[in-house]
Image: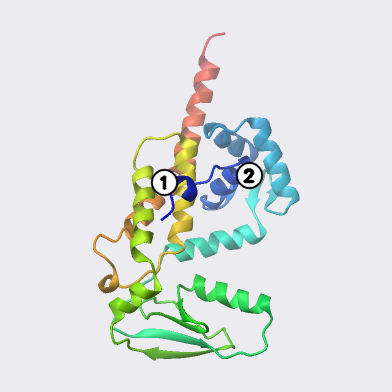
Amino acid sequence: MRTLDQLMPALSARSVALSIMLGSHPPKLTARDLVSLGASFGISASTMRVALSRMTAAGDLVAEDGAYVLAGRHLDRQVATDRRIAIRRRPYDGMWRMAVVTGRGRDADARASLRDSLTHARLCELREGVWLRPDNIADLDLTEFDELETFATIPTDDRHLSRRLWDLNTWAAEARLLLDFLSSQHEPIEHLAAAAAAVRHLRTDPALPDELLPERWPGDELRWAYDDYRNNLTATHLSAVRDSERTERSTPR
C-alpha cells in the first residue's frame, strides 16, 4: 500500500495549470484567471506565465481570443478521464467477459498498446493473453480489437476470481487515505494534489458489481468527493480572487 506522499507528489506550476484546465468545463480560461488561480495555490505570477508559455510552445495549450484552451492529447485525456470516472454500470447476472489474444507476430509496441487498452477498459489479465472482467459495464466494447477473440463465461466462484485479479483491499485503503485528506483542512495546493491523485486512483477503479466488492467500498464516495472539488475549483477560487482584488482597490492608500 502506498503512502500519501507516494499518492500525492508535489505539483509544479505546469501541473497546477494542467490540473485546473483538466477540471474546467469547458477547458478555457483567460491568462489573467490562470495567473490568479495559480496565485491562490502559491504559484507566483511570473512562474505561472513561464509555465503557460512553455505549455503553449509544447502544444498542451492553444492561445485563442485572449484565453488559453486545452489542446492536443490533453483534450483527449480530459474526455477519456471524464468517461472513465463516470462509469455506466448495468445489473450483474453472473456473466463475465473474456478476451483472448490470438494475434501473432506483434511487435513490443503493439503488445504494450493492446495491454494498455485492455487495462483502460478495466479488464484484468488472468494469465498471459487471457483477460477478464464481470459483464456489468454498459459501454464496454471490445469489437475494435482485431487481435482478440471474445467470449461470455460464468466463473465457478466469481468472488474468489475477482479477488485473485484485483487487489481490492489495497485499492480501498488508498482511496480512504485520499478521502480523509480531501475532507480535512489543508493548504489549497495540497487539496489540489489530493484531487489529482483521486482522479488517477479512480481511473484504476475496477468498477465491479456490488456483489463482488468488499463492504463499505469507497469508490463512489471518492468519486463524489472529487466531483464536489472539481465543481467548486474554478468558481470558488476565482470568486475569492475577485473579492481580494476588489478589497485591494477599495483600500485607501
Q: Horizontally, is 162 left or right of 5 in the view?
A: left
Closer to viewer: mark 2 or mark 1: 2
Q: Position of residue 141 (x, y in %)?
A: 48, 81
Q: Which mark is residue 14?
A: 2
**Quadrant assignment for the C terminus:** top right
Q: How is the image coloured?
A: rainbow
Could you give the CA–CA distance between mark 2 and mark 1, rounded to whole angstroms? 20 Å
Specify the amino acid type for callout 1: Tyr
Quarter of the picture holding the N terminus: bottom left
Q: Position of residue 67 (x, y in %)?
A: 65, 44
Amino acid of disc 2: Arg
Numbered disc 1: secondary structure: helix
Residue 212 location in percent, x, y? 28, 73
Secondary-structure class at tag 2: helix
Viewer-nearest residue: 241 or 155 = 155
Left of 222 or right of it: where is 104? Answer: right
For the point 65% across and 37% down, which residue is it? 48
Cβ atoms under marks 2 and 1 closer than 8 Å: no
Ranked by sequence position, the earlier of labels 2 and 1 is 2
Residue drawn at 46 percent across, 36 percent down = 188
Q: Which mark is residue 229?
A: 1
- The spot of residue 149 in percent (x, y) is 51, 91
Q: How many marks?
A: 2
Frontmost residue, 215 versus 15: 215
Q: Residues within 10 Å of mark 2 (few under 14, many from 20)?
A: some
Q: From where the camera sits, is residue 91 visible?
A: no
Q: Is residue 73 above or below residue 6?
A: below
Who's the residue at 44% across and 41% down the image? 191
Q: Residue furthest right?
A: 57
Residue 88 quadrant: bottom left
- Quarter of the image holding residue 164? bottom left
Residue at the far top in the pictured view:
253
